[in-house]
Image: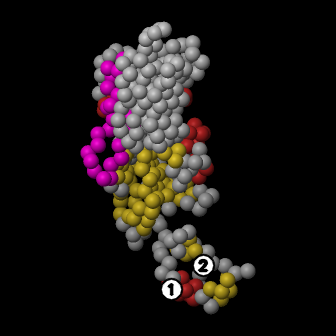
Amino acid sequence: MGRFLGGRIGNFIQRRTSNWAEDGIHTLSDQLYQKSLNGWKEGVSASGGDSVVIAASGYKYHVFKNPGTFILTSSDPQVVDVLIVGGGGAGGNNQGGGGGGAGGVKFLNQHPISPGPYSITVGEGGQANTTTTNTPGAYPTYGGKASTAFGWTCGGGGAGSQYHSNFDPAQTAPNPGAPNYVRGCGGGSTGRNGAPGGDGLTTGGSCVAGGSPSDIDAGGGGGGAGGPGQPSPENYHAGDGGDGLAVPQFPATDLSPAFDSTWAAAVTAIGYYGGGGGGGTELNNVNDGFGYGGDGGGGKGRHAGAAWPSAERDGTDYTGGGGGGYGFTPDAWSTGGKGVVIIRY
């Protein structure tokens, strides 16, 4: 039975907690009643993104997989929810490579915006490090790149360390100290010296030093946006990547029309983003000796001689996941997952 509203009987639904009127046809008396509650507002009208998803939940999502412009065409200021994810770092290799760190993740809840255009930047994942020497790699090449939106920046994840820790595991995104900057996560370390993982939003896992009974290296997991990478344990197993940050406002159940099944499996209905990559181990006869990627797109590590399909080793694109580490001189290298910016209202 409808309730009495504005001088007539009928069904009327207010929008969520903001007391907005639902779309539909309303009489003049209905409008006067709703205005008396200070709840009659213009709806959000906007454009931009690689795709727009209208979910069964009632939300509309603008998905930016590439740089672009979001334009609020409404005549009045509005509020939107925003997810910003930086690109993940590449995994390390040779002598128990460390897992790549995830990109930074930021959720803006009911963020106020004014009419007009807004530039969106989406960070690329770190490039695969195809060298097998102990020459340190430059962060801009192997670390993930930053994503930006609405005055916020989420840095890229640090690359995983390689070859006896001489590849600097601390090459994470710089932190300029700004309050609207979220650091990327640290890459996992590797080597025979028990080096720590890279620093960042969360740290990467440390390695297990080689030695008796054999000189074996196992890398630490890359840091995830929701937790640090795991150190490699004392049995020549590599560390797992840290889990991503759960952002249930952006679940795969709503957004799957804009992405492939690999992405949906990584993000899940919980909404995980920014999983760290698992570390690699040099030993090839240890059952499941590699590290697993963290929830939210982290790549799986590999032990020497094992199959390592790209779908397993690379960080998942559009999650900011870190790439997995490799245990010895590889014929394949992992990359970090690309970041993403998503806006909903």
The image shows a total of numbered marks equal to 2
Q: In which quarter of the image is residue 162?
A: top left
Q: In which quadrant is the N terminus drawn?
A: bottom right
Does the segment drawn in magenta span residue 121?
no
Amino acid bearing label 2 = Ile
Viewer-nearest residue: 102 or 261: 102
Residue at x 59% of width, y 56% of height: 55
- How is the rendered protein coloured? secondary structure
Q: Mark 2 points at which residue?
A: 25
In terms of image quadrants, where is residue 174? top left
Q: Is residue 260 among the parts visible in the rendering?
A: no
How far separated are the C-alphas under marks 1 and 2? 18 Å
Label 1 residue SS: helix
Other-residue count near label 2 (Cα within 10 Å), few / some / many at <14 / 14–19 / ≥20:
few
Residue 173 is covered by the magenta coloring: yes
- Residue positioned most to the left: 176
Residue lying farthest to the bottom in this orientation: 7
Q: Main secondary structure of the magenta part?
A: loop
Q: Which residue is drawn at 47% across and 67% down?
A: 44
Q: Nearer the viewer, residue 222 or 35?
A: 222
User: Which residue is the site of mark 1?
Assistant: 36
Badge number at residue 230: none
Q: Which of 320 and 295 is in front in this view?
A: 295
* Residue 28 % position (x, y): 56, 87
Q: What residue type is labelled 1?
A: Ser
Q: Earlier in the sequence, mark 1 or mark 2?
A: 2
Q: Is residue 294 above or below residue 249?
A: above
Region of the chain picked out in magenta, as a range: 161-186
